[in-house]
Image: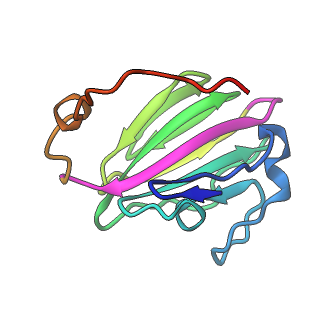
Amino acid sequence: MEGKNFSAVQVGKWENLLQYKNGNPFKAPGKVFLKDDLQCTGMEVSLNVFPPGISMPFYHKHRENEELYIFVKGQGEFKIDDEILEIKEGTVIRVAQEGERIWRNNSSEPLYFICIQARANTLEESNIEDGIKLDKSVEWIEK
């Protein structure tokens, strides 16, 4: 769905994410990239699930993009360079582009998370400074 100033997509329930297989060469189930469907121009976003016992199969870093990982449910471990962090629901981690990263679900429950990737060192103003308050009354149309 899209309008003049928005795009939206419904991917379904978190527990059904395993039905998706992303388009990269690894064809990993449980990863949904949203950049193209949402027509994002400054970030890549993915919704992810790692079943119990699954690990990212390789270390990686980025040339230009930092990543933000938001853990929604479950638990596991996240390794950045030589440091291991415990992750669980509510954990949020930013990794600079040069950070060597890998993570795993070492629990008996699925690990759900959101990954947002954006160009590092490009944010010039915070959200409050960038926002423009409109002189418009708030009205909702009841259905």
Report the residue at 80% width, 39% height from top: 13
Question: 5 left or right of 48?
Answer: left
Residue 46 in the image: x percent, y percent?
Answer: 58, 53
Query: Number of numbered discs present?
Result: 0
Q: Give the range drawn in magenta.
A: 107-121
Q: Quick check: 141 above or below 119?
A: above
Q: Dividing the image into 4 quarters, which one contains the N terminus?
A: bottom right
Question: 23 left or right of 140?
Answer: right
Report the residue at 63% width, 29% height from top: 72
Q: Quick check: 51 above or below 39?
A: above
Colour convention of the picture: rainbow
Q: Can residue 52 be seen?
A: no
Q: Quick check: 110 above or below 66?
A: above
Which residue is more in the foreground, 107 or 93?
Answer: 93
Residue found at the far bottom of this picture: 25
Residue 35 in the image: x percent, y percent?
Answer: 52, 62
Which residue is more in the foreground, 46 or 131?
Answer: 131
Q: Dividing the image into 4 quarters, which one contains the C terminus?
A: top right
Report the residue at 28% width, 64% height from top: 64
Residue 126 in the image: x percent, y percent?
Answer: 20, 34
Q: Tell me the quarter of the picture where residue 21 sits.
A: bottom right
Which residue is more in the foreground, 35 or 75?
Answer: 35
Q: Tell me the quarter of the picture where residue 103 sits.
A: top right
Residue 18 in the image: x percent, y percent?
Answer: 82, 52
For residue 74: magenta? no
Which residue is more in the foreground, 2 or 140?
Answer: 140
Question: 45 left or right of 29?
Answer: left
For residue 114: magenta? yes
The kind of secondary structure the magenta stretch mainly shows is strand
Report the residue at 85% width, 57% height from top: 19
